[in-house]
Amino acid sequence: MKIAFIATYPPRECGIGTFTNNLFKSMLINDESREKGHEGFVVALSDNELTYEYPEEVKMVIRQDHQKDYLEAVKFINLSGADICILEHEFGIFGGQSGVYILPLLHRLEIPLIVTLHTILKTPTYNEKAVLQEICKMAHHIVVMSHKAIEFLVEIYNVPKEKISLFEHGVPDIHFNPEKCKKEFKLENRKVLLTFGFVGRNKGIETVIKALPKVVEKYPEVLYIILGKTHPNVLRHSGEEYRIFLMRLVKSLKLEKNVIFLNEFLDEQDLFKYLYACDIYITPYLNEAQITSGTLSYAVGVGAAVISTPYWHAAELLAKKRGHFFDFGDFEGLSTILTELFDHPDKLKTLKKNAYQYGLNITWPKTGEKYVELAEKILKEETKVIAESDTEMDLLILPPFSLNHINRMTDDTGIIQHAKFGIPNLKEGYCLDDNARALLMVLMAYRQMKNMRALELSPVYLSYIHYMQNPDGTFRNFLSFNRNFLDEVGSEDSFGRTIWALGYLLGNAPNDAYYQAGRLAFFNAAPNFEKLKSVRSIANTMIGISHYLKSNPSDEGMTERLRNLANVLVLHFNENATPDWKWFESVLAYDNGILPLALLHSAEILNDEKITRIAIESMDFLTKHTLKDNYLSIIGNEKWYKKDGERSVFAQQPVDAMAMVLMYHQAFHLTKDKEYLNKLYTCFLWFLGENDLRMSLYDFETQGCCDGFEKYGVNRNQGAESSLAYLISHLTVLQAYEEFHKTD
């Protein structure tokens, strides 16, 4: 069995790195593993451009904030011959928002995955919860170190209990003589208290310092050793502020002879000497939110007498008289406990004995053996199922269709353009693009579902379009919240999207009044159709004309306009296409699916073989570059994708996913090939997490859709464009599902 480990790793000074190093050695560097032929390697996480002299088992390094490194790493792992992967997860060691960069790596992993969770938050942010849930979904098995962790995973993160195992934090099997250790450090005549680990405000060290004066009064030989460096994240943001605060506190309480700071990150041999030399080990954390503590496990493992606040891990590990508790921040209570234990050495001895006996069961060799057994079991019972291209449409995983967020975003003028998270951003006002999309969406919702709220919203968006139309048939785009025009003539794109919505209205009007209002605006705009220059505005206009002609096929003048516009797209294609670049421009930019979609609509009406051929060729070209891994990977708007250049992954936007959904839907109408419905469904799943970041763009709490994702993660603003793109796509999936089963 060959095992790949992904984690931080020594010499990086990090508790997770120390854990991984011990796990690696306990699983692979022992006689039994060698006999069975087990081997492995480490992919190490490096922080903030720092470089380390890693040991030979580290075969690859991921720079924490470089997304490309994660993708290179998974390629390496998949080609390495590894049978199983073990990931050590901790917030803060992976790049992107809430560590989201690890998700694309895990999604591409072709071997089973075991995940060790070192922190499980009781009250996670939306992103923290989403990232951890996705990791748990992709994991074959999850390892935690406390019963509380299992409780949180099941109740907060909805992880199946049978997928979780509890392996307690391992303790190195290192033994020293306490008397010799005291002598080595010249502590023979001192009563030694110890706290070790990274120093930060949540550690509550000031509680111990405040407790000392009363203890020192009776036992002046007491020495409190604070062993450890300031946490790197604290150091970056606050420097040594906390350590200086502690040193001033020591001075103000006249404890200079009783407190010592050792600002070091020790290797395990020296660390264990201090543990054996101490009389009492203290973890004075300030609140209960600590699901795992490696320092506490080490102290129990060596048989130290431990006093601790009752944080989650301590409450479990120190149960059954394996330690003594004091309340959070209660320095007076701690004084009393310390004095009592020094007064009664027999009680101190009992604590040490109970801890030592328990520690015998949690040594690293035993913990490593549990991981080996779990890995072997997974390899015998499970294999990773690789997604197949013929996605089965499953409506059960779709959220219920909801207009709640659209209601929030709409007032009596129209739909607000942008949102701050899930609330309308009134400062940004309204735009024509979004009100046209909104009209299209509600018309679809009423046509398919007879949704009465959709019918009620229709005149709001239609009246906005009417209000923004100029006498020459063009449209303004932007309107401030106080209803002041912000431009004279809007973009060609906004014009085209409006014609699309109006054309759909003329083909699917819910009543005559709306039909007549739409017809007036549509034909007032018509003289401008052939003045358009932008290929996307032409494409949007062609889609609108096509919807109109489906219910008005005898309008020969409009049919010729459609043919003329289609020929413009054909000309663009012929000018830019080469054998390996079947596209209308020298760049794949934004809203790409709209261009083949327009030709697919035109082909249905014009029955032109040349238009049909170019529609299919350009669609296939786009498919090749966005669906090659059986999920939709949209061309990012960060830099786009220039011919003979590199494609941009970020920033991906929902309108592009919508265009792909609609494109494949129309391709099915034209060809009756069901494979296009499967591709349509695959593209829709982009909204629900089947994407490069493995994060859902749909917000199940607000029923809105996030604005896309950037390098750092999901942009959690839920503006009109993105939410409407999701709803139009959702409605298209529902329609496609019916059509899929009708053709069975």
Image (cartoon, grey):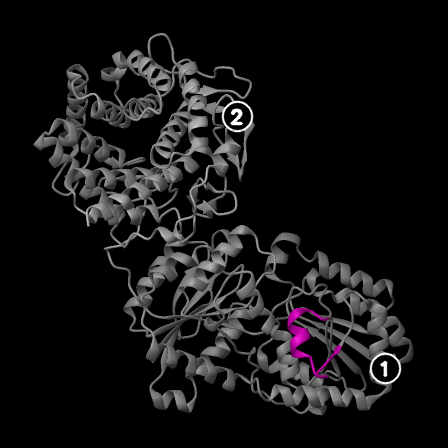
- Residue 140: give x, y in percent of width and height: 40, 70
Which of pointers 2 and 1 indicates the residue nearer the eye? Answer: 2
| 341 vs 725: above or below | below
Query: Quick one: SS at disc 1?
Result: helix
Q: Residue at x 36, y 83 (%)?
A: 38
Q: Earlier in the sequence, mark 2 or mark 1?
A: 1
The circle on residue 614 is: none
Q: Is residue 482 left or right of residue 111?
A: right
- Residue 3: give x, y in percent of width and height: 37, 76
Q: Residue furthest top?
A: 471
- Residue 569: give x, y in percent of width and height: 18, 27
Crowding around mark 2 (Cα neighbors within 10 Å: few <14, some 14 to 19, many 20+) is few
Quarter of the image holding residue 310? bottom right
For mark 1, what is the residue? 340
Q: Residue at x 46, y 42 (%)?
A: 706
- Residue 271: give x, y in percent of width and height: 63, 79
Is 306 in front, or is 615? Answer: 615
Query: Quick one: SS at disc 2?
Result: loop
Q: Is residue 309 left or right of residue 213?
A: left
For mark 2, what is the residue? 411
- The magenta stretch spans residue 319: yes
Q: Residue furthest right?
A: 217
Q: Which residues are magenta?
A: 310-324
* Residue type, mark 2 in image: Asp
Quarter of the image holding residue 611? top left
* Residue type, mark 1 in image: Glu
Asked whether the viewer can see residue 310, the reply is: yes
Crowding around mark 1 (Cα neighbors within 10 Å: few <14, some 14 to 19, many 20+) is some
Quarter of the image holding residue 106? bottom left
| 370 vs 552: above or below | below
Q: How many circles with numbers are drawn on the protein?
A: 2
| 649 vs 659: above or below | below
